[in-house]
Image (spheres, rainbow, N blue to C red):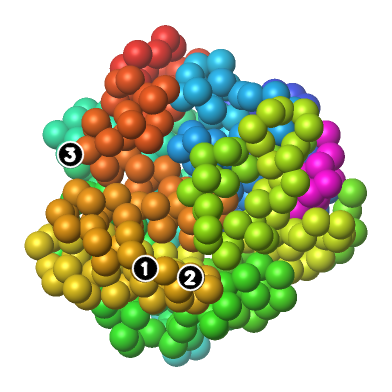
């Protein structure tokens, strides 16, 4: 039986999707039977990055929207510019967005499994130097990233004793192995951490920042440790990255998004746009400004949080006339400009995140409060902020954590989901104050798409509060 990297997702989607996904370019193929040597392994590895960027095969454009928009909408800082989607009220069952990450993450995981199987089958002497382990490290990073995102959006990641973990895929999907039960939360963390630890130990030290290196793997592990609750380990990871990695905070953070893109020395892992993507009429940044058939906007909550902050002048644009209380979101593209390679670039990991998660981890682990505050203020300085009274005056741990959260929102909204995950780490009463639509922890995660139960009867129970 011939295996294809997209078989599983084709089985879960409509026939219309088959045509689009079936036309992958040659360098996006990841079948194990096409991995014959180091050269073809490298080609297959590029196929994983193609899925990481969530490239639309029909338009040849990266589709990072679900990473940038969905978490920000759930947290209350962004919305749909032509009319609210139910997920903005944390009502996910009827949302038009919440099944998207399920499909894209399993496509990524499956591609990673194809490369892992194919490369493991080759002898070590088929590769030069340490390249076999490095390819496996990058592949296992991507599998960890996909599984962790699935756990974060569709599993009870906040309860390690829960049976509602991720559906873990460690083999390339064929028709014979689709049925599989979801794992527990602890089992999910164990596999994810096993993969990311392998990546830390074996990834290259230096790679272009649209590929994974060991520092990117450490940044991913930092995220995972924050969700897992090992704050001391998270603080140590952040300290290691800040002190020993080659990355430095951008002097003016605005320059990352408007001038430098992946040329910034702050970007640990970014998503490079496809060739000619900026010229395509329905590219990603054009859905922020001036808008296309979709428009994704900032909400009043984000504008209010940026009051008296120099970032408001370039992050928040004019009012959106379609939905009151919303504004053009100009993080990636300035008003009255057209899309460029820089505006089409996306960011999975920046050093800013490491500083802020490091500060949160220090506070949660009983570390040095002065150091934690200094990390937050350093990020704010690079955004042009000069008034640090709110940070300096935060006297209790809860107040300090809230200030860290506010800076995570100001710095990272619309990138890769940290504004949502950081919100959910706060005490439930605080979550309710910030996002009153959340009345139950059931709203921390999305329902598993119904198509999964149709194609995989062994999956198990739907998430609590939802129907199969």
Q: Is residue 354 above or below residue 339?
A: below
In the image, which residues are magenta? 282-293
Q: CA distance from mark 2 to mark 3?
A: 38 Å
- Which residue ends up furthest to the left in the rendered image? 366
Residue pictured at 14% horizontal, 34% vertical = 161
Percent of width and height locating residue 427: 22, 38
Looking at the image, tell me whether mark 2 or mark 3 is earlier in sequence order: 3
Can residue 223 be seen from the camera position used here? yes
Mark 3 / mark 1, whichever is N-terminal: 3
Position of the N terminus by quadrant: top right
The part of the image, by quadrant, that contains residue 256 is bottom right
Q: Residue at x 71, y 70 (%)?
A: 258
Task: Using a 10 Å C-alpha cutoff, classify the residue at mark 2 as few (fewer than 14 neighbours), some (14 to 19) or many (20 or more).
Answer: some
From the top left corner, tell me how far across and down residue 143 is, in percent.
Answer: 43, 54
Nearer-the-camera pick, 9 or 247? 247
- Looking at the image, which is closer to me, 188 or 361? 361
Which label number is shown at residue 388? 1
Name the residue that disc number 3 marks. Answer: 160
The residue shown at (44%, 48%) is 419
Per the model, the C-alpha gap separating discs 1 and 2 is: 8 Å
Q: Give the percent coordinates (x, y) of residue 232.
A: 15, 64
Q: State the SS at label 3.
A: loop
Locate residue 127 relative to residue 256 in the image: left or right: left
User: Which residue matches tag 2?
Assistant: 385
Is 277 contained in the magenta span?
no
Look at the numbered discs 1 and 2 and tell me whether their residues touch, using CB distance below 8 Å: yes
Question: Of 239 and 13, which appears nearest the observer?
Answer: 239
What is the C-alpha distance between the residues marked 3 and 1? 36 Å
Does 311 sit above or below residue 237? above
Q: Nearer the viewer, mark 3 or mark 1?
A: 1
Number of labels in the image equals: 3
């Amino acid at each position: 039986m011939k295996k294809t990297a997209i078989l599983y997702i084709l089985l879960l989607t409509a026939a219309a999707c088959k045509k689009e996904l079936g036309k992958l370019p040659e360098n996006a193929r990841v079948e194990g039977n096409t991995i014959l040597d180091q050269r073809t392994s490298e080609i297959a590895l590029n196929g994983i990055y193609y899925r990481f960027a969530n490239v639309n095969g029909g338009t040849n454009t990266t589709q990072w929207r679900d990473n940038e928009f969905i978490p920000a909408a759930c947290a209350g800082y962004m919305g749909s510019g032509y009319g609210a989607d139910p997920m903005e009220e944390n009502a996910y069952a009827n949302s038009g967005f919440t099944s998207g990450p399920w499909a894209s993450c399993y496509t990524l995981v499956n591609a990673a499994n194809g490369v892992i199987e194919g490369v493991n089958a080759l002898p070590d002497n088929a590769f030069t130097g340490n390249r076999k382990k490095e390819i496996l490290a990058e592949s296992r990073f991507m599998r960890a990233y996909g599984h962790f995102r699935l756990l974060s959006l569709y599993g009870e990641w906040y309860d390690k004793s829960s049976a509602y973990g991720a559906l873990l895929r460690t083999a390339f999907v064929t028709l014979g192995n689709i049925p599989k039960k979801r794992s527990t939360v602890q089992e999910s963390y164990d596999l994810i951490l096993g993969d990311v630890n392998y990546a830390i130990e074996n990834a290259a030290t230096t790679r272009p920042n649209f590929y994974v290196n060991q520092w990117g793997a450490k940044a991913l592990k930092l995220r995972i440790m924050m969700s897992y609750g090992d704050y001391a380990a998270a603080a140590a990871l952040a300290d290691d990255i800040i002190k020993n990695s080659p990355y430095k905070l951008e002097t003016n953070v605005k320059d990352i998004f408007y001038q430098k893109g992946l040329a910034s020395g702050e970007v640990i892992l970014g998503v490079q746009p496809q060739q000619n993507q900026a010229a395509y009429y329905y590219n990603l940044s054009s859905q922020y400004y001036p808008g296309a058939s979709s428009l994704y906007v900032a909400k009043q909550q984000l504008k209010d949080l940026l009051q008296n902050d120099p970032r408001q002048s370039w992050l928040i644009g004019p009012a959106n006339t379609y939905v009151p209380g919303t504004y053009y979101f100009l993080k990636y593209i300035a008003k009255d400009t057209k899309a460029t390679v820089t505006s089409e670039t996306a960011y999975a990991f920046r050093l800013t995140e490491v500083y802020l998660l490091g500060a949160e981890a220090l506070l949660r682990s009983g570390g040095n409060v002065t150091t934690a505050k200094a990390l937050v203020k350093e990020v704010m300085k690079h955004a042009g902020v000069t008034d640090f009274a709110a940070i300096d005056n935060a006297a209790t741990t809860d107040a300090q954590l809230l200030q860290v959260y506010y800076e995570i929102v100001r710095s990272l909204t619309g990138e890769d989901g940290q504004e949502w995950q950081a919100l959910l780490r706060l005490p439930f009463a605080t979550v309710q104050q910030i996002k009153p639509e959340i009345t139950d922890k059931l709203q921390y995660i999305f329902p598993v798409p119904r198509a999964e139960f149709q194609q995989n009867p062994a999956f198990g129970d739907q998430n609590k509060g939802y129907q199969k």
